[in-house]
């Protein structure tokens, strides 16, 4: 069994990665999508991903890693992330021998998560069927949500503080690297910081 771990570099997917690295001995393929759009978060995200992966390899165990890129930066609209994730997850699952699980760092408290997850899975299933028609891929791929029922504050509390500080959440960073503090992701992170830690200023 090999699990494809879709990894954004945010707090939730970092907590998921650590859970899978420490709670199981199964093969992991960790994949990050460099997702460029008008929000301009991809450079901050890539920097977070790089440092989190280095930390995780040194502290936990080895894993396969790859990334791909989708560049929508010349579009006026912001494409829906979960559709892009479904699309890439299918391509990478086919590229991963024995891949029969896909892990997503979604939380029960994420906006409209039940509907979004169902739609994401439908996009994946239709695409995956195209490959199965060519006899590629495993017959069954299970989607798992390892941290779904854990409140965000508990996820943060369970991780080493220095690792939490490496994660990136902001959707619309100012000048590419400074958290805006007003987007939904920034607001979800509010209150997770211990009083002494100016973690959100680390990129300035
Ligand atoms: Zn923000």
Image (spheres, helix red, strand yellow):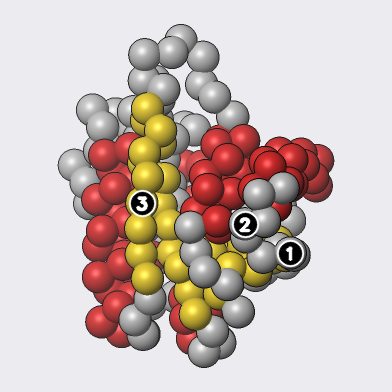
Residue located 55% across and 36% down the image: 84
In the picture as drawn, the residue positioned furthest to the left comes out as: 204
> As displayed, is residue 157 above or below residue 171?
below
Is tag 2's residue or tag 3's residue first in the polypeptide sequence? 3
Q: Which element carries disc 3, helix, strand or loop?
A: strand
Give me the disc on residue 136: 2
> As displayed, is residue 98 above or below residue 13?
below
Where residue 3 appears, as percent x and y from the top left, is: 56, 71
Q: Residue 54, located in which quarter of the rendered image?
A: bottom left
Few, some or many residues within 10 Å of mark 2 (<14, 14–19, 20+): some
Give me the disc on residue 67: 3
Q: Quadrant of the N terminus?
A: bottom right
Q: Nearer the viewer, residue 103 or 184?
A: 103
**Drawn side of residue 67 relative to residue 125, left or right:** left
Is tag 3's residue or tag 1's residue first in the polypeptide sequence? 3
- Measure how far apart labels 2 and 3 are at the Cα level: 21 Å
Give me the disc on residue 121: none
Q: Quadrant of the C terminus?
A: top left
Q: Which element carries disc 2, helix, strand or loop?
A: loop
Q: Which residue is mark 1?
A: 139
Few, some or many residues within 10 Å of mark 3 (<14, 14–19, 20+): some
Residue located 75% across and 65% down the image: 140
Residue located 47% across and 42% down the image: 186
**Drawn side of residue 197 relative to residue 133, left or right:** left
Few, some or many residues within 10 Å of mark 1 (<14, 14–19, 20+): few
In the picture as drawn, the residue positioned furthest to the front comes out as: 134
- Measure how far apart labels 3 and 1 are at the Cα level: 24 Å
In this rendering, the label closer to the viewer, 3 or 1: 1
Where residue 73 appears, as percent x and y from the top left, is: 36, 20
């Amino acid at each position: 069994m090999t699990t494809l771990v879709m990894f954004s570099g945010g707090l939730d997917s970092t907590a998921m990665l650590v859970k899978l690295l420490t709670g199981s001995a199964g093969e992991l393929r960790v994949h990050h999508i460099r997702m460029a759009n008008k929000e301009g978060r991809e450079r901050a995200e890539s920097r977070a991903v790089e440092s989190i992966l280095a930390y995780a390899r040194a502290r936990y165990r080895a894993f396969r890693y790859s990334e791909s890129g989708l560049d929508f930066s010349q579009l006026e609209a912001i494409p829906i992330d979960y559709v892009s994730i479904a699309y890439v997850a299918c391509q990478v699952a086919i590229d991963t021998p024995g891949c029969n699980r896909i892990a997503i760092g979604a939380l029960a408290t994420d906006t409209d998560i039940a509907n979004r997850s169902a739609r994401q899975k439908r996009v994946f299933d239709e695409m995956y069927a195209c490959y199965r028609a060519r006899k590629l891929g495993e017959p069954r791929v299970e989607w798992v949500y390892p941290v779904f029922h854990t409140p965000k504050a508990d996820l943060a509390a369970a991780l080493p503080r220095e690792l939490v500080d490496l994660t990136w959440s902001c959707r619309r960073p100012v000048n590419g690297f400074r958290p805006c503090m007003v987007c939904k992701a920034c607001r979800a992170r509010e209150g997770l910081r211990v009083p002494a830690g100016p973690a959100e200023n680390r990129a300035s």
